[in-house]
Amino acid sequence: MKVPSYTRRRDSREMLSMTPMIDIVFLLLIFFVCASIGQRPLFYFSSESVAAGTGVDVPIEQPPPKLLEKIDLKIRRQGEQTVVEMDGRTIDSLEALRPVLLELSELASDVPVNIDAADEIPYADLIAVLDICRETKFESLNFVLPPPKGRRPAAAPPKRYAE
């Protein structure tokens, strides 16, 4: 009589194929990836609606629109005094310019400041305006230059009419 050996059973267990289980794991992985594509992240919902589980969509809070795109400072002379024109209003002194620019820099310090100075402006006043802009922490300061004299603008190409 032949005695069954346990080694044969071990061999048959070791011979089990792992292919079906790997296929199932990959199918589940693909299913969960495809199912999660259309989901909204949870951090867009307020904590009350997530906790209550109401399923009501809460509007997404968007950042406020940028109020200013740029600040244009036109420095001119009126008599013996230097004045600054900004957004259609005239600021009579450089001391009055500081609080206005400070208030604007608190709202948006990343907007560029364009400084357009007339030729007759003393350098001391121009440097004072530049120092005020730097003190109020504006990140970008630009000088507006007039077009070079003696140069004509490039001529427009001739128009061609279709016949």
Image: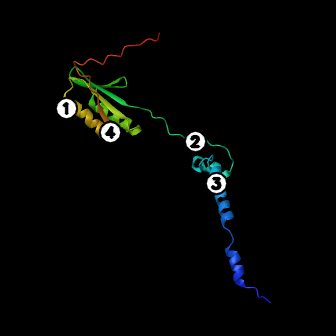
Q: CA distance from mark 1 to mark 3?
A: 70 Å
* Residue holding disc 2: 60
Q: Mark 3 sits on what residue?
A: 30
Q: Residues within 10 Å of mark 1 (few under 14, many from 20)?
A: few
To which quarter of the image does residue 28 belong?
A: bottom right
In the displayed structure, 160 sits above or below 77; it is above
Residue holding disc 1: 124
In primary-sequence order, the first of circles 1 and 2 is: 2
Kindly identify the amino acid type of the residue bearing the numbered disc 3. Answer: Ile
Please, what is the three-letter code of the amino acid marked with disc 4? Thr
Q: Position of residue 54 (x, y in %)?
A: 69, 48
Cα–Cα gap, marks 4 and 2: 33 Å
Secondary structure under the numbered disc 2 in the rendered image: loop
Q: From what the image shows, is residue 34 above or below residue 137?
A: below
Kindly check if marks 4 and 2 are in contact, taking CB atoms under 8 A apart as contact. Answer: no
Q: Are marks 1 and 3 in contact (CB under 8 Å)?
A: no
Question: Which mark's residue is nearer the viewer, 4 or 3?
Answer: 3
Q: Residues within 10 Å of mark 2 (few under 14, many from 20)?
A: few
Please tell me which residue is depicted at 24% across the width and 19% down the height of the picture. Answer: 151
Q: Is label 2 or label 3 in front?
A: 3
Mark found first going from the N terminus, 1 or 3: 3
Q: Which is more N-terminal, label 3 or label 4?
A: 3
